[in-house]
Image (cartoon, coloured by chain):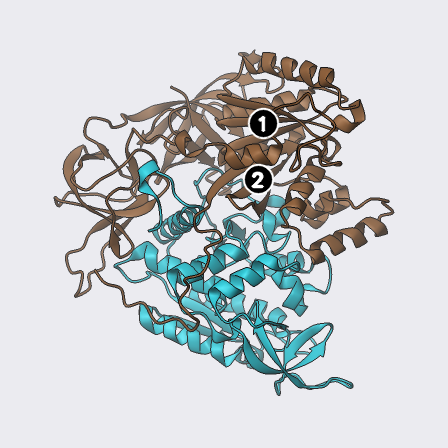
Chain colours: A cyan, B brown
Amino acid sequence: MTATHADYRLSQLDQLEAESIHIFREVAAEFEKPVLMFSGGKDSIVMMRLAEKAFYPAKIPFPVLQVDTGFDFPEVLATRDNWVNRLGVKLIVASVEQAIKDGVVVDDGKTPRNRLQIGTLLNALEEGGFTAAFGGGRRDEEKARAKERVFSHRDEFGQWDPKNQRPELWSLYNGRLHEGEHMRIFPISNWTELDIWDYIGREAIEIPSIYYSHQRRVFQRDGMWLSETPHNPLREGEVVEERTVRFRTVGDMTLTGCVESTASTVPEIIDEVAAARVTERGATRGDDRFSEAAMEDRKKEGYF
Amino acid sequence: MATDTQPTTGEPTTGPDITTGMDLLRFATAGSVDDGKSTLIGRLLYDSKSIFEDQLEAVESTSQSKGHEYTDLSLLTDGLRSEREQGITIDVAYRYFATPNRKFIIADTPGHVQYTRNMVTGASTADLGLVLVDARNGLTEQSRRHAVLLSLLRVPHLVLCINKMDLVDYSEETYNRIHQEFTQFATKLNIPDLEVIPISALQGDNVVERSQNMPWYSGPTLIHHLEHIHVASDRDLIDARFPVQYVVRPKSDDFHDYRGYAGQVAGGVFKPGDEVVVLPSGMTSTIAGIDLFDEEVAEAFPPMSVTIRLADDVDVSRGDMIARVKNAPEPVQDIDAMVSWMTTKPLQPRQKLAIKHTTRTGRALVKDIQYRLDVNTLHRDQDATELGLNEIGRVQLRTTVPLLADPYSKNRTTGSFILIDEATGVTVGAGMING
C-alpha cells in the first residue's frame, strides 16, 4: 500500500488496482462460470496478480484458460506454469494444433496462428460452458479497443457488435446474458502500458524472461526482427544474425517481433517505454498491420 | 499473514516510479468536430507525447487519401470504421495521457442531441467536464445542453474552453461576452466550480503554452488547470458506506475460520474498532480488521477495494451494506429519480424493469413520470407521458427490494442506478436519486 492516508488520496496506480479488483469481484459474484484468459503476456500476468488480490486469502474462484498456438515461446509457458502452480489454480489449455486435428479450425497454411486462435478459443469457451471470460485488453492499445466496454457482450457466435454496445455507467456493470451468449470482461481497460510496467515493478512479480534484454538469433522481415524458429522458414534474402533484443508483446512466435534493447530491469524498461515513439502493437505485431481496421475485424469475430 | 511471492525473473525494482505516486483525473469532453474538440484532444495527446508515430502516420495517410490538406486529428479518436466512414464520433472513446504530475483519462463523447446517452455515460465517472464553444458562434444550444448534462451528473468541476480565439483576433471583448453569458446561464445549474479559458486548439494558445496573443488573460492554461485542480476533496469522507460485493471464505487449513466481506468503499472512512450496522438486517457489530490483500490496513476510504472482517458472526451477503450505527441510509423502496433513457422503446408508466444499485439487484415498477426535462432550455414538460431515447425526466419507481441509497447529490455511487430490460438484457436507463 503506497497511498498517503493523511489526506485520503490514492495514487493513480492504487485507484486502477481498486477498480480492477472491484471488477473481478463483480464477475465472480454475478456469473456462474467465469474463466481467466491467460496469454502469458505481461497484461495477463497483471490480471493474475489482481485476481489473486481480489480473493485473498481464498484461491482464485475460476480456472485459467490458455490458447496454445503451438508457436508459443517456451519462456512464456514456463512462466505460466510457475504462476498456475503458485496460485493453485486450475489450468485449461486449448490447443490450436488439436483444434486443427479435430476440424474445429482449418489451417490453410496461410492463415496466421493468431487468426486460428479465435476458433480455438470460442470452441474452448463453448465446451467449458463459460459465461464470462476475462481478457487483458487495454483501451490505450488500439483505437477499436478505446470504445470497448469493461463488460463486453458477445452473441451466441462469439461476435462483438461495436455499434450496439450496452451503455456502461459509473461502476455499475450489467452482466445479463441469454442462453449461449457470453461476456468478455476487461478489468484493466483503463491501464496504460506504462501503468502495467509500473505495477510489475512495484509488485515485483514474475514475467517471461523474453521481456528483458537478451541475446537472440533473429532475422528481419517487414521491418521487424523475428526469432529464428523451425516454424518460420527463412525467405529468400533473409539472414539470421545475433542481436541484443527484448520483446514488447508476446504472442505467436512467427509473427511477434522483438526490438533491439539493452533494458534488462523493470526501471530500464519503463525508461524505454516512456521514450518510445511507436505503439507496442505497431512496432511488433504483424497481425495488426494488415489493415487500419485489422483489430476491429478480429474483435468482431471474437478475438480477445 | 505472509505471502510467498515468487522471485522475479528480472531485477527487483528500486528505480523511478513514473506513475505510482501520481494521482488521477477523469474528465469528459463534449462537442462536435466543428468546435475543434478533436483538434484539442489531439493537441493534448500530442503535446504530452501520447500519440505515437505509427498512429500519426496512419492518420496522415488516411487524411491524404481522403483529399484533406491537413492532418485530420479526429481520425485518431474516431475508432470504429462506421465512425470514420460517417466522419462523426458515435460512441464514448477513452483516451489516456499523463503529465509528470497526473494521469488523465478522457471520456471523449459525441455532442449531438441524438447521442445524449453517450454523454451521460462519459460524464458518469468524470471529475471534470470540458465544454468547448467556438468563439465566433458563442454559446449554442449544444453547449448549453452539455453544461446541463454535466450539472445533472454532478460532475463537480467544469471548464468552458472558448476555442478558435485566433479567428476573433484574440478579442477580450468576445471572451468577456461569452463568459458572462455562460455565467448567467450557469446560475440555473449546479456547477460548484467553473473556469473559463480562452484558447486556440489549432495554434496552441493557452492549451499547454501560455498565449502571447492574449496578454489580457491572467488565468491558467488548460493543462495547468487540469493538472492542479483538487479532486480528492470531492469524495464524501463523512458518510461511511460499504456495499458488500462478495463473501471471502477460503475454507483452507491456514484460514479455516476466515470470513471477510469484500467490496469497494463508496463513502466515508472505515477503521478497525468501528461500530457498524449491516443493512438491511440492522444487525450491529464491530470491525475486527480490514484487509488489503495480505496486509491489514488502519483505514479504508473511497475508492479502496478491501475486505472487512467483523467481530461477530452476523449474517452478511452480497447486496448488503455496512455503514455506521449512527449514520446509515434508510432502506427505501419508493424511489424518486432523474432518469436518462437510452433505448428506442420509450419508458412508460406500469413498465417493469430490472434495477441494479450498488451491488444490489431487484425489479422496479415505473409508477409515474412527473416531467420530461428539456436539456436545452431546462423547461419541464409536466404533460409528458413517456421518455424516448436520449430524453431525461423525473420518474417515480417502486422496487421489489429496498435500496440502501443516498441522494445522488451526496454520493454518486450510492445515489445512482441502472435500469435493465429484462427481456433483452440491455441497459436502457440510468438513474440519479433525488433527495
Whether residues under marks 1 and 2 lie with C-beta atoms below 8 angstroms apart, the answer is no
Can the viewer see residue A71 in this picture?
no
Q: Is residue A109 left or right of residue A20?
A: right
Q: Is residue A176 left or right of residue A281?
A: left
Residue lying at 71% horizontally and 36% vertically, measured from the top left:
B204
Position above or below: B426 against B234:
below
Instruction: State the image coordinates of residue A76 (x, y, percent, origin top left).
Output: 48, 75
Position above or below: A264 against A146:
below
Instruction: State the image coordinates of residue B123 (x, y, percent, origin top left).
Output: 53, 33
* Separation (CA) of disc 1 from disc 2: 15 Å
**Quadrant of the rendered image containing residue B233:** top left
Secondary structure type for disc 1:
strand
As shown in the figure, which amino acid type bears the numbered disc 2?
A: Ala
Secondary structure type for disc 2:
strand
Q: Which mark is residue B194?
A: none
The chain identifier of the residue carrying mark 1 reads B
Local packing at callout 1 (Cα closer than 10 Å; few below 14, some 14-19, many 20+) is many
Q: Is residue A158 left or right of residue B7?
A: right
Q: Which mark is residue B159?
A: 1
> Mark 2 — residue?
B107
Residue lying at 41% horizontally and 26% vertically, measured from the top left:
B408
Instruction: State the image coordinates of residue B245 (x, y, percent, origin top left).
Output: 32, 45
Residue lying at 44% horizontally and 68% vertically, measured from the top left:
A65
Residue lying at 54% horizontally and 74% vertically, measured from the top left:
A213
* Mark with earlier residue (1, 2): 2
Report the mark closest to the observer, 1 or 2.
Answer: 1
Along the line of sight, which residue is nearer the eye, B119 or A184? B119
